[in-house]
Image: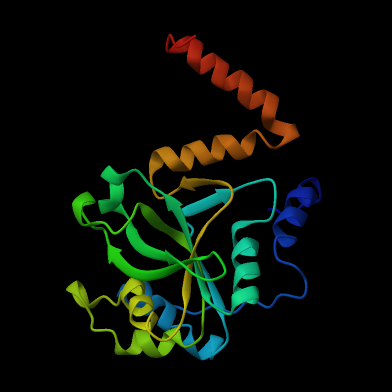
Amino acid sequence: MVAEPRKRDLLERIVDIVPGHVDRVYVTQTEALGLGHAILCAASVVGDEPFAVLLADDMVKNDGPGALAQMVEVHERTGASVIGVEDVPLKKTASYGIVGVEEDAEGYKAIRTMVEKPQPEEAPSNLGIIGRYVLDGSLFDYLRDVQAGSGGEIQLTDGIAAMLARHPVIALPLEGERYDCGSRHGFIEATIKYAMDHDDIREDMLDHMAGLLRAYGRT
């Protein structure tokens, strides 16, 4: 068990992940009816307050302020909702939600259009949405009015697109390196990169990888 004395350090790392002043509330999505529906399940907890959505498929690593901190700063400065984006190769737009933007008076990328997984010739830009959002509480009202699509799913993108006319939404290119942990390659790549940041395992990992490279004739 983790609570055993010899594993006390590991237990403390797990417990200390969440600051002591933070309360955790769990809400269950009983049916897989889309990301928009999942967010609607939390409406009674969030109320009309601004809130953040972090999708575990995406990890953003940097040595400065984290992705969410960058976004909250822009939200507090502008009052707008903020969506994390990154430049994606034009040939890969069909794998992302893509935003069309226009620079506003403050120099931010104000979102004018959102297209879910467009073909390159139909994409309004090459700015792909990644799994970080800071959203106004009014989004819940728009999500309730969204028409369910295939399989009865309610899409978050549709809800955000519906609020564009009345509520500003900013696309923020995030500082840092993003890993797509929804793919096997991205998950393994992120694991290796994070391992390099830990003094207690870095050398063992480097030795292991060097051995693998020799074994597969890549040295």
| Residue in view at x 71 percent, y 75 percent | 22
Q: Position of residue 114 (x, y in %)?
A: 32, 68
Q: Nearer the viewer, residue 58 or 95?
A: 95
Residue 57 seen in the figure = no
Q: Quadrant of residue 166?
A: bottom left
On screen, residue 57 above or below 207? below
On screen, residue 139 above or below 216? below
Q: Position of residue 56 (x, y in %)?
A: 49, 58
Q: Is residue 3 left or right of residue 109?
A: right
Q: Nearer the viewer, residue 89 or 95?
A: 89
Q: Is residue 45 left or right of residue 195?
A: left
Identify the residue at the far front of this view.
Answer: 105
Q: Position of residue 195 (x, y in %)?
A: 63, 36
| Residue in view at x 54 percent, y 87 percent | 45
| Residue in view at x 36 percent, y 74 percent | 156
Q: Nearer the viewer, residue 182 or 94?
A: 94
On screen, residue 166 above or below 92? below
Q: Is residue 11 left or right of residue 101?
A: right
Q: How many marks?
A: 0
Q: Position of residue 136 (x, y in %)?
A: 51, 82
Residue 89 seen in the figure = yes
